[in-house]
Image (spheres, rainbow, N blue to C red):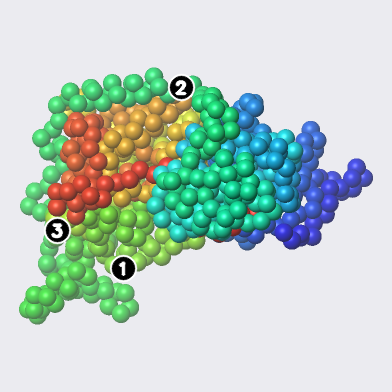
Amino acid sequence: MTSTTHSPLPGPGGPGPDKLAFTLPSGRRRVTPVRVGREFRRERPLPQLIRKAVLDDDGQQCVQVRLSARDSANPAARALLDIEAGTTLQLNQALGDTDYAPLFPRIIGYELDAAEPFLLYDPPRGTAVTRIQVMGAADQGVFTRDLMLALCLLERRGLLPRGVSPATVRWDGARVQLWGLESVTGIGRPRRPWGAAPFCPPEQRDGEGLADPRDAVWSAAQLLYRLATGRLGPADRPPPDLGEHRMLDQMVRDAFAPRAADRPTPAQVLDLMAPGTARRVRLAVPPDETRPHHDAFEEALQLKRQAPASRTGRTPGAETANGEVLCPYCLETIRLDLTKLFVTDSRMQYQPLDLKGINNPVRRTDVMRGAVQKCTADPEFPAHYIAVPYLTHGRPLTVAMVGQSSTGKSHLLTQMIAAITDGGLEPFGLKWQSVNPEQHARFVRDRVQPLRNGKVLDHTAALGMDDFARFVESLLITDARGQVRPVAFFDLGGEDLVRTDAALRFLLGVDALVFVVDPALALPLPQLDHARQRWGVEVNRDGDLAFGTVLDRLPKSGGYLDVPAAMVLGKADLLRFQPPVDRWLTRPPATSLDPELMREESRDVYGLLRRHAGQAWLRPFDAVRRCTLHIASATGGQEDQGRYPAGAGPRRVLEPLLSLLAMHGMVQVRGGADALAIGEAPALEAVPWEEVERGGDAGRFERAAGPEEPEESEGGELQ
């Protein structure tokens, strides 16, 4: 570890301290003067800067672990810091003030969305094992017990530390303390390379199979051998002299098995030392305050199952006759008219297109693919043009985003479309094309690329009649049966939705609604106070005004609206350590739809909103017969001084759209589309289209327990 120049802790007569703002484990914000000491740099597994600090408002000593501005621009480094913070917070909450708590670092606070994110810890206990040459037999017994106990506690939380090494384990002569929690992954997750031989087990080095608690037992055994002998063990087999060390031979001989399946679990090793200890390990389980709300969710689904459904499953009055569709700009009806076609010339000017001289059908189709039609349905509306493919593939499927202007709809919709164009629908048998290549290229240039590069998108002005609906983008989606359908995306400024015939006509033509919930407006949780203060908003107990305005305009059938809907708890990164958000936000993107899992997520979001926000925020779920609830983050973090320091990293932005496409029959789901939203059929997992066509069960979706981790190689020592 190399040191960098930094002023030591100033004395009483030195310069005044800086201010430090951070979030406490309780979710409250704290701002305090701070004095910092000399800084050290640790390169692996992530490039962290480490220094001692004193919080001057109470004199509390701590250690700050942070990323420099340069290092924090790397999304992988930020992801690891997030994992470390989330794991430590989870353990601190579960262990509380029990005797187990000292086995892990205690976090004081964190700031993860700044240009230089950091964590604050209590000072570490003891000495890193890298500085201990050989340990006596008596200490080895206590050390082994504590280390296996720490691994058992992590296993009870479904977690596996991949970074157990001399650099991440500390010893103070009486107790172990396990650091390196950025290495944690979920048990059952696909293995990814981490660490180096001999402390990294063979299967982990190869990145094969699924993470197993016995992976860490190999690492612990190698660490114990190093403490007993002062030497490193072999990278892929038991040490040849293991028999010369009686305690090691008795306790961990099988831990050196090349295959994880042949090793003991942490609990089995612990019970060899102290029979029954593993069974007595108990973690604090906070009361489930959402349980009554889960019951209410199930009761609401039961009422929906009993309600009669419309025969079409679509909004009444949505059909248009004779190939007519709603113009996405002026929202009047329009149909293909070959006398009103145009193409752009080299100067990007519209020129009339005459098809009479194009007799070759292949060339005619190609020309039509790039042509546009001038819409004259509303002579008072500014001149506008519609891509011909939008008019030639039947009635478009219209998806409308609903929510107040501050909810982050634009960012969510931009990332949703970007995920589609990145191939996110392919695992579900869907392919895409741009309706208008020029328009799509402009959308990518003006919206997708700036957001990915870290720029906060500006609020865009509405473009439709009476400023209530803004057309954003349209794509041609081809399903596994070869059927092509345009999908058009709109942003509704619902709180300003005026009661005009045009507004009603548009809403009657909407095929799917996405209601975006802003947690800062909905949830009176202390960890959101800082965001509310920054944005100048307050909790709204009456729900989102846009939701009610839209829902009130739509006719009901059998007591419910028939248009499929999804509710999205957006900006979920603000709550990434809050159950149940932490559970869902860290899941990898879905590759197939599991109705049971989707209803589980819906139940969790319903319980969170009903418990903290109240029934007003659940009005879309109560009003719409088929409605799923989701957790998503368009950016993965919050902006700092007008930018996302590591770019915008979306999480779970496609799941709401996938649910809606499934309800419209464009994604195949076992049990039918209703199985997703109301559980009408037995809950069976969905499979990719190729498996549906074969009729087999291969390739079923495998559930994973944790976030995607970047690949890293070695552990590092905390001074």
Question: Label 2: few (<14), some or many (≥20) within 10 Å?
Answer: few
Instruction: Please tell me in which quadrant of the rendered image residue 59 appears.
Output: top right
User: Do we see residue 458 in this rendering?
Assistant: no
Three-letter amino acid code of the residue under disc 1:
Glu
- Residue located at (19% from left, 57% from top): 478
Earlier in the chain: of badge 1 and badge 2, it is 2
Residue 110's x, y, as percent?
A: 63, 42
Three-letter amino acid code of the residue under disc 2:
Glu
What is the quadrant of the N terminus in the image? bottom right
- Residues under labels 3 and 1: Cα distance? 24 Å
- Residue located at (58% from left, 33% from top): 273
**Residue 16 higher or lower than 288, as above or below:** below
- For label 3, the SS is loop
Earlier in the chain: of badge 3 and badge 1, it is 1
- Residues under labels 1 and 2: Cα distance? 51 Å
Q: Are marks 3 and 1 in contact (CB under 8 Å)?
A: no
- The residue where tag 2 is placed is 289
- Residues under labels 2 and 3: Cα distance? 47 Å
Earlier in the chain: of badge 2 and badge 3, it is 2
- The residue where tag 3 is placed is 482
Three-letter amino acid code of the residue under disc 3:
Gly
- For label 2, the SS is loop
Residue 519's x, y, as percent?
A: 47, 36
Residue 412's x, y, as percent?
A: 40, 48
Point out which mark residue 438 bears: 1
- Residue located at (60% from left, 53% from top): 241
- Residue located at (43% from left, 46% from top): 262
Question: Label 3: few (<14), some or many (≥20) within 10 Å?
Answer: few
User: Do we see residue 675 in this rendering?
Assistant: yes
Residue 504's x, y, as percent?
A: 23, 39
